[in-house]
Amino acid sequence: MPAATTTDLLGLPRAALAEALAPVVDRPFRVEQIYQALYARAVPDFAAMTELSKELRARLEERFHIGNLKVSERRLADDGTCKVLFRLGDGATIEAVDIPDRGRHTFCISSQAGCALACTFCVTGYWGAGRDLTAGEIVGQVLALRADRGLPMEGLNLVFMGMGEPLLNLANVRTALDLLTEWISPQRITVSTVGLLPGLEEMARWEKRPNLAISLHAPDDARRSEIMPVNRTTPLADLLAALRRFPLERGRKITFEYILIDGFNDAPADADRLVRTLSGLRAKVNLIPVNPDPVLGDRMVPPDDARIDAFQARLRAKGLIATVRRRRGDDVSAACGQLRAFGRDPRGFRGRKAVPAR
Ligand code: SAH
């Protein structure tokens, strides 16, 4: 373990890295070598930077460390989905998931160790708030998962759909994206959010914008507020107005995630209502049959396949692009909304009572 007194280099973008290294390294090409070693090669320590002299490596060792994340547990699902647990320096635990699909890999990564939003269908939210992850811990998940799965950085898709609300930790998410977009096109990166207005306004000003996914989950305010407390302070009209202003490059659309809960939001009239709610937006809908979990109570049940298909068909008939997210990795609790540090609460909190949908 690195001494607490040394500076962690992981998560520093180029300029910040050069500044931190200045007392030891002054030539820009050396800084670049270290930058590449940290991120493109994801070296475990300075000893692995054999392109540097022994003396320089020793001097780096004295002042700095590389806060790599270590996979502390791993669960492989039958479908190839792999969920890993990281134990962070302060004991907090987070999860990330590798989802392989026809030769491509999507990494689902966390932005916070927990979540304060308390959506009633989400296990992460059930366990309550945690702390923000640093940029190094966000980038570190990608590096560690890639190393663990033996994958190159190129060709990855990234989704910020793990634990936490990325827009509540936007500064660190942005720093992490600045780093990651050197290797992964922003078009291959999606940030998923409940849609917090200040965060959306900030993202709208970014130069390299990732794809945006909005966790919508209900077609109207009454039901969205029932399952997503955030909707009580940011009602749909405000959210949709902000999304209409959100700049989209040619051909891009905003993804709306809509979990289907049996008997709650899956009626044909709900599909029609959803179409009206999204009218005027460049939208596509991703339907997610809700993943049940014991802590959520027994009313979070997905509709049967016929009802899911009918809902999708109704959206399509009205001209909306709608896909159904196949459930992945649910045999190891790696599916959407099931990330909660391998069933343990890292802070000893017993969790609030699940509020079932009606
Ligand atoms: N806070 C952000 C990022 C987390 S993304 C957001 O809400 O978008 C996690 C995704 O999984 C979200 O779309 C979330 O709504 C969805 N999800 C949560 N619980 C789920 C469950 N039980 N079944 C299916 N999807 C769920």
Image (cartoon, rainbow, N blue to C red):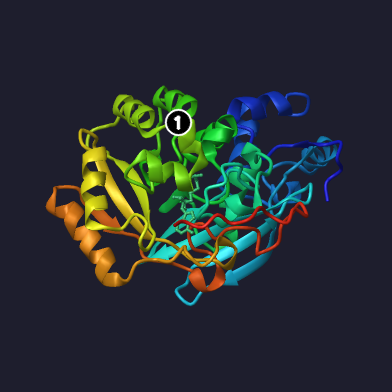
- Count of numbered circles in the view: 1
What is the x, y in percent for residue 23? 78, 24
Q: Is 56 positioned to the left or the right of 335 in the image?
A: right
Q: Which residue occupies 57% across, 57% down?
A: 123
Q: Residue furthest bottom?
A: 78
How far from the left and from the top, in percent, is residue 2? 83, 46
In the displayed structure image, the side of residue 99 where residue 90 appears, left or right: right
User: Viewer-proximal residue, 94 or 66?
Assistant: 94
Which quadrant would residue 341 be assigned to in this image?
A: bottom right
Q: Is residue 37 visible?
A: no
Residue 43 in view (yes/no): yes
Give the vertical position of 27 relative to 343 (above or below): above
The residue carrying mark 1 is: 234
Where residue 10 sits, quadrant-wise, is: top right
Residue occupying the point 32% across, 26% down: 241
Q: Quadrant of the C terminus?
A: bottom left
Q: Locate residue 110, reporting x and y percent.
A: 57, 48
* Residue 332 versus residue 173 in the image, above or below: below
Q: Residue at x 21, y 63 (%)?
A: 310
